[in-house]
Image (cartoon, coloured by chain):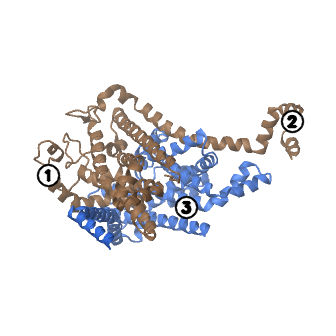
Chain colours: A blue, B brown
Amino acid sequence: MTSTTTTISRFQKLIEKNQVIVSSRRKMTNAIMLSITGVMTLLAIIPLFWIVGYVVFKGGQYINLDFFIHTPRPLGMEGGGVLNAIQGTLIVAGLASLIAIPPAVLAAFYAANNPNTPLGIALRFSTDVLSGVPSIVIGLFTYAVLVKPMGHYSGFAGGVAMAILMLPTIIRTTEEMLKLVPHTLREASLGLGAPEWKTSLSVVLPAALNGIITGFLLAIARAAGETAPLLFTALGNERYDLGLIVQSGIAQKQGIFEIFRRVFDQPVDSLPLTLWKYAQQPYPERIEQSWAAALVLMIVILLINIFARLWVEYRKRRLQG
Amino acid sequence: MDKVNLSAGVQGNTMTKYIRTLPETHWLTRLRRAILHGDLPWKWIIIAAALLVMILILAVGEMLWRESVDARTTFGFGFLTPTKDPSWDPVNDEFQAWPFIYGTLLTSIAALILALPISIGIAIFMAELCPAWLRLPLNWLVELLAAIPSVVYGLWGVFVFLPLVVTPIATGLFDVFGSVPVIGSLFTGPVPVSGASRLGAAFILTIMIIPTITAVTRDVLLAIPNSQREASLALGSTQWETIWKVLLPYGLSGILGAVILGLGRALGETMAVTMVIGNSIEGSASLLRPGYTMASIIANEFAEAVTKLHSESLIEIGLVLFFMTLILNMIARLLVWNVARRTPQEARI
């Protein structure tokens, strides 16, 4: 009985000394700061919904079928679309994938197989560093290496610039995916007498293929939205129409090679490039089209992103469970 | 299997005949077998692919260095140093890069100051506070913020963000700080009606670098061992005190790495900044006035460069930008790796 009373009186002394009040101030700080982090999170999410919502609202008003199936008409004329830019984006992105994927996957094999050798560490380090190089610098580099010696802007140069941008992303994701393949698979194949390259290409690679494809999709989604590296490589070309090139090539019996040459030799447009150029013009119809271009670009890129991430999650769940 | 291969393709070759007379353990025999088996070529091919990335970085530096030789010899260091009255005159071939370097540094650092508390707040919320089911969707939302193309940011910035948000804030800042003695030079007016200013660029950059800083900071926080949290909580700390006094200091070098990574991203960002910064070359140091960054002057003028010296000056600006981001990225990666290595759990960034 006496011990209880002493505890209570001690507690009262503590209250008199303001100790309990101090602790409630600490609790207040705790609550305030923790809720501030929540507010910060909301603050960062707002622009995302604002941008997506506004682009969907504006672009939705101006988008129509013409937008996808016609090349640009002269100002003042009704209709017209950005077919040239859509074709150009596909050509540049396709070329970039063809150029980037083989060396990126091979380099990823090296990084995954030799993570702790000096070259392996250097590779991972320089991959990270390359991913931080500004895209406009890559554009300048490609201009100096390809456009200047060749003497003209081309879709090919645009593809190379974009491939350099895609390299780090593909290497990193492929490396992560290759590391996830169980060692037993590799060992079984090697134990059966298959050489290293055959094991890598026909056992390890297929096992990791799903993840590699998602990584590649993310890389291409990032690259497709880039404008800066195309400014002085693909340049932009309002008159570009793949259909016409192919038709004229066939009509004049110039053969498939000539068609390819024309596809590669001319400057091409791309969706972000068109968006940028149109947004700077004072004509309302151009600005309307740039909103529509923004909508198409954003929807495609966000869908690829969401799809790739969902797929990764699904795979992960299935592997774990 | 070897014998079949040997006699199949290489009948008349004297080298092959010579090697076949050698004993099994001779290095030439081994080399030949390794090549026929395919492992040696494979090894060299993947090493070549690995070297390609490094060669690419060196090649970028070398190429820009070589292509800017005239500008470098003509202008020397005066090209880069601060000047009161810089000139950028394609007609008379006089170029100085200071206004662009200043614009880049000012907008990037302002963006960093704004983005840092927000990013760390989000990272803390995602790593320490939010329920497990919310973590993944939140992570996605922040990453989608990084997936939106730069030009779309620019378009939205020009038509929505500048007039609605930047102009009022810039006017307010001008009213409050415009006449304050020292820092007033950063806030001199008049504020452009369109809102296109260095401040607008800084705001857009803030939104764009938040995902970078957040992702790395969150990974750093998640990599800190639980024993640290438990020890701090057991001593009677509140959750905030644990975060502020234990976790953040523990991951400090990694967070510093995240900040530098964000800075690198901000320095190199081109399209969105070009669209909102107003693109004007003037002597004013003000945050509220239009300006230029290194990336945006290249984007705007390179394709239409008038003289050789003009385009070489732009390439030299590109070279400076390249070295700045290269050094920043190297430091950042080393810092982040340092944290990842120190902790037992994996923190791959």
Is residue B83 in sight in this rendering? yes
Label 1, secondary structure: give it. helix
In which chain is the residue bearing label 2? B
Depth check, front residue: A50 or B139: B139
Seen in the picture, residue A315 relative to A166 is either above or below; the reply is below
Type of amino acid at the residue the image marks with label 3: Thr
Residue A66 locus on image (x, y percent) = 41, 69
Q: Earlier in the sequence, mark 1 or mark 2?
A: 2
Which residue was labeled with disc 2?
Answer: B24
Residue B224 locus on image (x, y percent) = 46, 54
Depth check, front residue: A27 or B224: A27
Seen in the picture, residue B254 relative to B326 is either above or below; the reply is below
Which residue was labeled with disc 1?
Answer: B174
Q: Residue furthest front?
A: A2
Which residue was labeled with disc 3?
Answer: A214
Q: CA distance from mark 1 to mark 3?
A: 48 Å
